[in-house]
Image: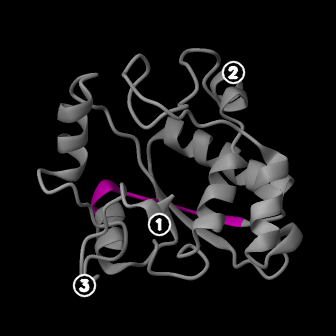
Amino acid sequence: NVARTPFNDRRVREALSLAIEREKITEGELQGTTRPADGFLPAGARSGKRLSSDIQRAQTLLDEAGYADGTGFPVVQLVINRNDVQQRIAKAVAQMWKDNLGIDTNLMVRDAGEVEAARASGAFDLIRRGVVLPTADETVSMLSIFGSNGSVSIGPAESPEPTSPFRRENY
């Protein structure tokens, strides 16, 4: 929810992403049944930059954002659905944030309708959702997520303007 501090700081969002050890999740929680989610698009799709874990960089970014070792960072309110796999992944990610950054997380397990209500009202810090894309075609996948105008609301529904995740300041 980029409408909330500290998640409105790109360094914080990047630090949280870099602190996730995706290989551990796929080998541990998912028992090797999948590959790490190292990109925005499905495995095999054309894409440039890949996501990877970099704990030292994550700690540096969090320090630059004013939260060295997680000091002063609010407890993350992470909304997830009731799916068992989603819950296991969220628990693993929360533990990684604790171990790697010193950040505590409160998992808020909700039904699908409640997840959407939380998103619409802005009553969340982060929402963990899985998406099954209709194809590996980049254009079709992006349109299915962001619509034809290239924008998606990544804050509460009443945010004045949708924010494009493709804008430079979001990375």
Q: Which of the labelled discs sits on residue 169, or is there none?
A: 1
The image quarter containing residue 141 is top left
Secondary structure category for the residue under label 1: helix
52 left or right, relative to 112: right
Amino acid type of disc 3?
Pro
| Horizontal and vertical percent position of residue 121 | 32, 79
The image quarter containing residue 167 is bottom left
Mark 2 crowdedness (10 Å alpha carbons): few <14, some 14-19, many ≥20: some
Q: Which of the labelled discs sits on residue 160, or is there none?
A: 3
Q: Which of the labelled discs sits on residue 136, or is there none?
A: none
Of the image marks 2 and 3, the number of the one nearer the N terminus? 2
Question: 73 or 90, which is in the foreground?
Answer: 73
165 left or right, relative to 70: left
Residue on which disc 2 sits: 27
Question: 42 or 34, which is in the foreground?
Answer: 42
155 left or right, relative to 64: left
Q: Nearer the viewer, mark 2 or mark 3?
A: 3
Q: Residue at x 65, y 18 (%)?
A: 31
Q: Residue at x 36, y 54 (%)?
A: 166
Question: What's drawn in magenta, residue-wise?
Answer: 105-113
Instruction: Give the CA distance from mark 3 to mark 1.
Output: 17 Å
Amino acid type of disc 1?
Glu
| Horizontal and vertical percent position of residue 74 | 70, 79
Of the image marks 3 and 1, the number of the one nearer the N terminus? 3
